[in-house]
């Protein structure tokens, strides 16, 4: 039975949508993955997010540099449960955020920080995006890889599974929800080369291959903008952490997301030998500019062209950059990210 708290939250969210006057389908390319809609309730964040500890703020359950004193990235939202059974275990349904196709699920929680998790592929405005739902108590019986699911369709039950020794406490049972771009469909081969002595139990659907956007920003912007919300413009509008040059022209990310590439008449005329790429603080490539040989200085495979120091100070947790002798450079992590991107 759905609790009164769930009914109130759902009714409030519906009222807000109806008040806006926009059609529901146009208003929400993405839907909430659980009945918890307190994100739309003024001051309701403490009922929406699961913090890491009882004395931590709700922001520790959000997206970004919110862990370990801003030194560790959290790539999704930890959405708090609303209902439990007699044992105190969560029973909230977990639903597909948009129409899509199930591409992967893991039912061996010891193999992932996400515990039991599901990945669903969506095509929104011609752009591939992948939703991930983690810490599930169970995947819906009979769910299959390749199965089409509809927005709002129940695909799992919320839980608190993980591969950590301490586990997830009942009070903070939640679903980890993220919206991601897929970096490289050659990931499994790259991982074997980069980490020859480490297992990769999830193939291309390893979390290292999914680069998260902020779902909170997306949900809030699409709610406030209605039919004017455009996912491609949202991605293109990310704040730039740095700009890099890569001497590569035929990598999978470029083929998967050609809409992120800009036009350059010089490169079109002379030939493309590399790409100038803008990265946000989480390493998401959001603008790619083709470059000709005449526009490139140096012969290094990867070059750091510019740094937004204010953004680096505000969001340092991915550690993509390092300052050496008064100059910025790509860190080991930053170089590894570019190796994966262009592999």
Image (cartoon, grey):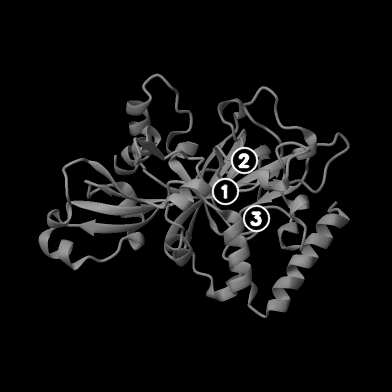
Q: CA distance from mark 2 to mark 3?
A: 16 Å
- Return the x and y of residue 25 as percentages of the image width and height: 60, 71
User: Which quadrant of the figure has residue 220?
Assistant: bottom right
Residue 81 appears anywhere in the view: yes
Q: Tell whether label 1 touches label 2 (CB within 8 Å).
A: yes
Say whether disc 2 or disc 3 marks the residue closer to the N-terminus: 2
Q: Is 343 placed above or below 7 here? A: above
Residue picked out by circle 3? 153
Q: Quadrant of the C terminus?
A: top left
Residue picked out by circle 1? 178
Q: CA distance from mark 2 to mark 1?
A: 9 Å
At mark 3, the secondary structure is loop
Q: Is 221 placed above or below 332 here? A: below
Viewer-proximal residue among 328 and 20: 328
Extreme residue in the top direction? 197
- Return the x and y of residue 2 as percentages of the image width and height: 83, 53
Viewer-proximal residue among 133 and 151: 133
User: Which quadrant of the figure has residue 91?
Assistant: top right
Residue at 18% across, 68% down: 265
- Return the x and y of residue 131 as percentages of the image width and height: 54, 50
Residue 281 appears anywhere in the view: no
Extreme residue in the front direction? 326
- Please give left or right for residue 244 compared with residue 217 in the image: left
Closer mark to the observer between disc 1 and disc 3: 1
Q: CA distance from mark 1 to mark 3?
A: 17 Å
Residue picked out by circle 2? 134
Say whether disc 2 or disc 1 marks the residue closer to the N-terminus: 2
């Amino acid at each position: 039975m759905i609790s009164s708290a769930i009914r109130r939250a759902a009714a409030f969210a519906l009222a807000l949508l109806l008040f806006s006057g926009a059609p529901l389908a146009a208003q929400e390319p993405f839907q909430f993955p659980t009945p918890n809609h307190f994100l739309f309730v003024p001051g309701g964040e403490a009922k929406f997010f699961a913090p890491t500890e009882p004395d931590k703020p709700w922001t520790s359950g959000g997206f970004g540099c919110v862990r370990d004193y801003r030194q560790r990235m959290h790539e999704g939202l930890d959405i708090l449960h609303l209902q439990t059974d007699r044992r105190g275990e969560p029973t909230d349904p977990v639903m597909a955020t948009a129409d899509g196709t199930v591409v992967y699920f893991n039912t061996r929680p010891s193999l992932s920080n996400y515990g039991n998790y599901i990945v669903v592929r969506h095509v929104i405005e011609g752009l591939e995006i992948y939703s991930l739902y983690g810490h599930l108590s169970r995947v819906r019986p009979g769910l299959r890889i390749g199965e089409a699911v509809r927005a709002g369709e129940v695909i799992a039950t919320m839980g608190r599974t993980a591969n950590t020794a301490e586990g997830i406490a009942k009070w903070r049972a939640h679903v980890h929800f993220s919206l991601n771009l897929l970096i490289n469909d050659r990931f499994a081969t790259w991982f074997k080369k980069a980490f020859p002595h480490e297992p990769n139990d999830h193939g291309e659907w390893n979390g290292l291959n999914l680069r998260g956007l902020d779902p909170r920003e997306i949900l809030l912007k699409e709610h406030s903008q209605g039919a004017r919300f455009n996912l491609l413009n949202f991605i293109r509008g990310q704040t730039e952490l740095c700009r890099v040059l890569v001497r590569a022209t035929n990598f999978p990310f470029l083929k998967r997301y050609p809409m992120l590439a800009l036009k350059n008449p010089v490169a079109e005329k002379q030939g493309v030998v590399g790409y100038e790429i803008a990265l946000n603080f989480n390493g998401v490539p959001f603008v790619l500019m083709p470059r000709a040989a005449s526009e490139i200085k140096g012969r290094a495979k990867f070059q750091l062209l510019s740094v937004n120091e204010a953004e680096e100070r505000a969001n340092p947790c991915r550690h993509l950059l390092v300052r050496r002798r008064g100059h910025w450079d790509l860190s080991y992590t930053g170089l590894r990210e570019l190796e994966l991107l262009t592999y």
